[in-house]
């Protein structure tokens, strides 16, 4: 229950914009409510985009950036769209950092040829076919399919989150679905 001036209202009936306004006035309980409402979606999106490595830290980073960025939130923007945009930025930062680390590790391995490469432990976690199919996609294609098909974000909001035109979202969805279908068929899945 949430108290709206003298009335107890179920938390799920309180709008994001109301909670956001309360947050801007310093109400931490309202931010807690937004966190509880969106943390599972953010976690799921980050898992699909980045895998399990540092997942808890990434979720925490998204909500930390959201809390710090609330004063800059445009009143016309939907909180969920804005939060997904932060999630996308955190995922991109993580992938960039992962690529830099991988390049650094590759340099170290070439300097010491006696050292055998460590097994890719991340691959051990990707056992279901859909996850493996998602891995085959570029980050741009994976992002649209995760946001639209898995998180059920409308195409217009996906475009806003990723900063691309709606037509590009539609095109990427078409190509991403085709690539996933092809991968699954190669794995013997009848579609």
Image: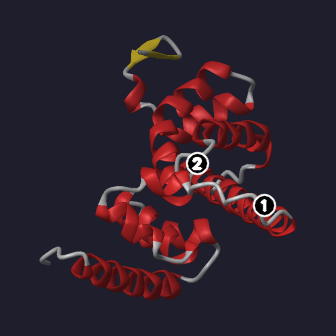
The residue lying furthest to the left in this view is 190
What is the quadrant of the N terminus in the image? top left
The residue shown at (63%, 58%) is 85
Is residue 15 visible in this depiction of the protein?
no
What is the quadrant of the C terminus in the image? bottom left
Given residues 165 and 65, the one toward you in this image is 65
Left or right of residue 27, residue 189 in this image: left
Q: Secondary structure at mark 1?
A: helix
**Residue highlighted by disc 1:** 105
Return the x and y of residue 95 as percentages of the image width and height. Answer: 68, 62
Q: Which mark is residue 58?
A: none
The residue shown at (25%, 82%) is 186
Return the x and y of residue 178 as percentages of the image width and height. Answer: 33, 86
Given residues 162 and 60, the one toward you in this image is 60
The residue shown at (24%, 75%) is 187
Is residue 66 visible in this depiction of the protein?
yes
Return the x and y of residue 176 as percentages of the image width and height. Answer: 41, 81
Q: Which mark is residue 79?
A: 2
Marks 1 and 2: which is nearer the front?
A: 1
Q: Disc 1 or 2, which lies upstream in sequence? A: 2
Q: CA distance from mark 1 to mark 2?
A: 39 Å
The residue lying furthest to the right in this view is 111
Q: Secondary structure at mark 2?
A: helix
């Amino acid at each position: 229950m949430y108290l709206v001036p003298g009335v107890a209202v179920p938390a799920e009936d309180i709008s994001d914009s109301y909670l956001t306004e309360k947050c801007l006035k310093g109400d931490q309980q309202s931010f807690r409510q937004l966190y509880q409402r969106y943390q599972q979606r953010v976690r799921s999106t980050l898992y699909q985009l980045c895998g399990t490595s540092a997942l808890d830290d990434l979720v925490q980073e998204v909500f930390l950036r959201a809390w710090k960025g609330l004063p800059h939130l445009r009143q016309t923007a939907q909180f969920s769209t804005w939060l997904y945009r932060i999630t996308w930025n955190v995922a991109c930062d993580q992938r960039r950092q992962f690529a830099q680390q991988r390049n650094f590790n590759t340099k170290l391995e070439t300097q010491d040829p006696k050292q055998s490469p460590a097994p890719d432990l991340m691959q051990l976690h990707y056992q279901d076919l859909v996850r493996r199919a998602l891995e085959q996609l570029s980050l741009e294609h994976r992002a649209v399919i995760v946001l639209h098909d898995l998180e059920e974000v409308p195409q217009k909001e996906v475009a806003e989150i990723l900063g691309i035109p709606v037509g590009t979202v539609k095109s990427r969805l078409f190509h991403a679905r085709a690539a996933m279908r092809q991968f699954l068929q190669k794995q013997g899945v009848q579609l």
